[in-house]
Amino acid sequence: MRAVILRSFGGVENLEYVEDFPRPEIKEDEVLVRVKAVALNHLDIWVRTGALAVKPDLPHILGSDVSGVVEKVGSLVRNVREGDEVVLSPGLSCGVCYECLSGRDNLCRYYDILGLKTKGGYAEYVKVHARNVVPKPKNLSFEEASSYPLTFLTVWNALVRKGNIKPYSRVLIWAGSSGVGVAGIQIAKLMGAFVITTAGSAEKAKRCRELGADMVINHYEEDVVSKVREAFREGVDLVMDHVGEKTFRKSVECLKKGGKLVFFGTTTGSNTQVDIRYVFVREIELCGTYMGVGADLFKISELFERGLLKPVVDKIFDLKEAHHAHEYLEASKHFGKVVLRVT
Ligand code: ZN
């Protein structure tokens, strides 16, 4: 099959397009999907460069966010049939441990992400367990459908499950133009919250407002903490931070007493210092989150089908051009998702 494979860790030149990679063989409880589109995530870059503690065996195939058509199902599979249009849930878990059965599959001891250690969707075909296959929203193109699983699952977990967001919450979402930023603005608005976000240009700020942001701060020109405090003297209820080292302390300083920081992702690094007195005196909650609960993807997909959430695809590249797509994502010029069209 056609695929973009990673032969060794490092720069974009390590992404190699081939036409003769072996097609995956499915087991009786698995599904083979013909990939139509696969969206990029920062995770793809970290896996490519070998920056993570967990590394896949090489050659590897990246790609966590897949849409496609069911090509073949194992003998035990009942939830989908050949020809069904689907999106794949990127969190891979065992399905039978205590955490999985308690609806916290993202805490499964065997947890993996499609494209992390398991071969992903930069290929003509990918296989997953039947539990990872969700119907594609009918109103979305394959490119649009590939754009939301990982980011929206992660943000749903952070804002709704862990952040306990309410219609009266005041929320700060960092980097509104990123994949998770776009998801954060929309989910927070859907829950009725007042949304503040940050953007690096007037054009990006405009697009954040179009997505529903009530207030946008240019983080290059303005001090985010002061602007937040100008708007709400006591601070905000909830902050979602996926930027890491550069923003973590500011996130804590933007919170009101009793506020909560939900955080995941470290695009600027993972070391930070916070004065813990500031945290405990104000009863600030620091809440790490990781991916999301797989079942939520069914509900998120329904919200897309009803038009309550909107996919934001910035640019589509052909599968062969995966290396250019990586360069483009790393240059941070995008607004929303970068997608590879596969078939
Ligand atoms: Zn498990």
Image (cartoon, rainbow, N blue to C red):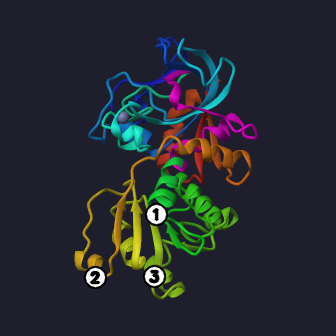
Q: Earlier in the sequence, mark 1 or mark 2?
A: 1
Position of residue 210 measured from the top left corner of the image (x, y, whole percent): 70, 64
Q: Which mark is residue 235?
A: 3
Q: CA distance from mark 1 to mark 3?
A: 16 Å
Position of residue 21 measured from the top left corner of the image (x, y, whole percent): 47, 13
Q: Looking at the figure, which quarter contains the N terminus?
A: top right
Position of residue 298 measured from the top left corner of the image (x, y, whole percent): 60, 41
Q: CA distance from mark 1 to mark 2?
A: 20 Å
The secondary element bearing badge 2 is classed as helix
Q: Which residue is mark 2?
A: 281
Q: Look at the numbered discs 3 and 2 and tell me whether their residues touch, using CB distance below 8 Å.
A: no
Q: Which region shows up in magenta?
A: 125-152
Q: What type is the residue that disc 2 sits on?
A: Val
Ligand 1, by image quadrant, is top left
Question: Is residue 122 at all visible to an observer of this figure?
Answer: no
Q: Earlier in the sequence, mark 1 or mark 3?
A: 1
Of the residues tagged 3 and 2, which is closer to the observer? 2
Q: Residues within 10 Å of mark 3 (few under 14, many from 20)?
A: many
Residue toward you, 298 or 330: 298
80 over 106 or under it: above or below: above
Q: Which residue is mark 1?
A: 163
In the image, taking residue 152 as reference, residue 82 lies left or right, namely right
Q: Residues within 10 Å of mark 2 (few under 14, many from 20)?
A: few
Q: What type is the residue that disc 1 sits on?
A: Gly
> What count of labels does the image hold?
3
Of the residues tagged 1 and 3, which is closer to the observer? 1
Residue toward you, 101 or 311: 101
Q: In the image, is residue 90 part of the stretch drawn in magenta? A: no
Q: CA distance from mark 3 to mark 2?
A: 15 Å
Q: Residues within 10 Å of mark 1 (few under 14, many from 20)?
A: many
Residue pictured at 63% horizontal, 65% vertical: 189
